Amino acid sequence: MKIEYLGHSCFKLTESTGTSVVCDPYDSSIGYDMPKVEADAVTVSHGHYDHANTGAVVGNPKIIDSECTCELDGVHISAVKSFHDGQRGKVRGENLIFKFRMDGIDICHLGDLGEACSSELIELLLPVDVLLIPVGGNYTIDAEMAKEYVDRLMPNVVIPMHYRDKGCKIDIEKVDGFLEAFDEEDVEEADGSELEVTRRVSDDTRVIVLRRRNG
């Protein structure tokens, strides 16, 4: 399966059959434009402008924005409720965590997760092969809390998201603090926006920073 980073917390996930899902599309208020993409489905972790611009995705996609379990042309999708803050949603409300199974690979998109790591939530999310995780803090978990999630979920691949990139107007931190929590040899800064992922072959965790696709 293929993962393409479209910026902020937005990814396009494509199974080998061609079925595709876009996660958390944003609008230009964040400081840069959402690339033009087509997909079979769009998942929305919560209704904020930087995660719910479903109109940016063409192709008449199925919109999934509530807790559910469903199948989409062989792709298994489930959504688990969580909180957007550390006070059980009293500050910023709820957040949906999405899990996808594509080509035998378990992918987890944490959305704007803001709550501390708990055994109950970890049990709901396991197993995870590829983890798409917010690391910028302020509105989500920060670098330190993100590292705890990585340690507990033990994914094969970690892709950071929701951090301050070039042009971003949102008050969040850069990715650097998160990367510093890992050994240098376990971190890779990719040359492009796409990553091909095959079945899990080792228990090692590697962090891959994808470049945002432009246009």
Image: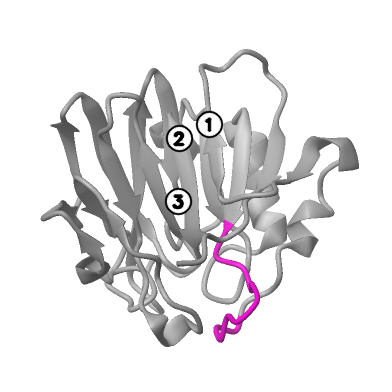
- Where residue 1 appears, as percent x and y from the top left, is 43, 28
Q: Which residue is mark 1?
A: 196
Judged left or right of residue 60, residue 81 is right
Q: N-terminal of the two: label 3 or label 1?
A: 3
Front position in the image: 31 or 200:
31
Q: Is residue 126 magenta?
A: no
**Residue 18 falls left or right of residue 86:** left
x and y percent of residue 119 in the render? Answer: 51, 38
For the residues labelled 2 and 1, the Cα–Cα distance comes to 5 Å
Tell me the tag on residue 2: 2
Residue 167 magenta-drawn? yes
Q: Which residue is located at x 60 percent, y 84 percent?
A: 171
Crowding at dot 1, Cα within 10 Å, few <14 / some 14-19 / many 20+, comes out as few
The part of the chain drawn in magenta is 161-171
For the C terminus, the quadrant is bottom left
Mark 2 Cα shell of 10 Å, populated few (<14), some (14-19), many (≥20): some
Q: Mark 2 and mark 3: span between their CA atoms?
A: 18 Å
Q: Main secondary structure of the magenta part?
A: loop
Q: Which amino acid does the dot numbered 3 rest on?
A: Leu
How far is mark 3 from mark 1, CA to CA?
A: 20 Å
Q: Check contact, mark 2 vs mark 1: CB within 8 A.
A: yes
Tell me where residue 49 appears, x and y as whole percent.
Answer: 33, 79
Relative to 73, say whether 49 is above or below.
below
Question: Which sits earlier in the primary sequence, circle 2 or circle 1?
Answer: 2
Q: What amino acid does circle 2 point to? A: Lys
Q: From where the camera sits, is residue 85 visible?
A: yes
Residue of label 3: 110
- The first of marks 2 and 3 along the sequence is 2
